[in-house]
Image (cartoon, helix red, strand yellow):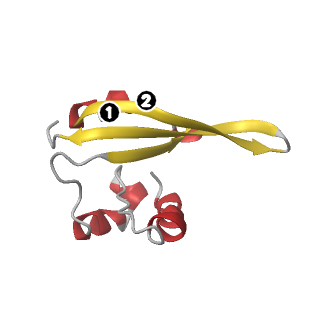
């Protein structure tokens, strides 16, 4: 995740709805979220999460996050339109029961 998208989502969606947003990825991309993640406590063992990813930055989460959760399910796929044409998609995955293991 790029910190710009995380910041916008955090400010406009997560904080007003009292939802803990965590960013994971390369430190060069998430910047200050590495500190924010620690401040917010990360994920606790057994906790569930939602993963939001766009098709422009898509990497199947089952390839890189599968070992951390017992179950990963695609919940929703939303098209993004520009000039009445679909230009990309947003995928929302439900991640069940964080194991903390790799």
Asked if the residues shown at circle 2 and circle 1 are in contact, with their CB atoms under 8 angstroms apart, the answer is yes
Q: Nearer the viewer, residue 26 or 72?
A: 72
According to the picture, the residue beneath numbered tag 2 turns out to be 60
**Residue at left offset 21%, top offset 64%:** 41
Q: Residues within 10 Å of mark 1 (few under 14, many from 20)?
A: few
- For residue 91, above or below residue 18: above
Residue 31: image quadrant is bottom left
Q: Position of residue 2 (x, y in %)?
A: 47, 55
Instruction: Using the rendered image of the protein, determine whether residue 76 is visible from the camera's viewpoint.
Output: yes
Q: Residue at x 28, y 38 (%)?
A: 96
Answer whether residue 55 is visible to the viewer in this image.
no
Q: Quadrant of residue 18?
A: bottom left
In the picture as drawn, the residue positioned furthest to the right comes out as 83
Name the residue at 47% across, 60% down. Answer: 6
Which numbered dot is residue 64?
Answer: 1
Distance from disc 2 to disc 1, alpha carbons, whole Å, reads 7 Å
Q: Position of residue 83 (x, y in %)?
A: 85, 44
Tell me which residue sits at (34%, 51%) in the image. Answer: 24
Q: Quadrant of the C terminus?
A: top left
Relative to the observer, which residue lies in front, 20 or 59? 20
- Say whether residue 69 is left or right of residue 19: left
């Amino acid at each position: 995740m790029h910190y710009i998208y995380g910041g916008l989502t955090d400010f406009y969606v997560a904080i007003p709805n009292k939802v803990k947003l965590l960013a994971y990825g390369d430190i060069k991309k998430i910047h200050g979220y590495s500190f924010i993640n620690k401040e917010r406590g990360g994920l606790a063992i057994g906790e569930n999460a939602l993963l939001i990813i766009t098709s422009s930055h898509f990497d199947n989460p089952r390839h890189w996050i599968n070992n951390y959760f017992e179950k990963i399910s695609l919940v929703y796929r939303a098209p993004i339109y520009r000039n009445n044409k679909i230009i990309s998609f947003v995928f929302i995955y439900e991640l069940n029961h964080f194991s903390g293991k790799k």
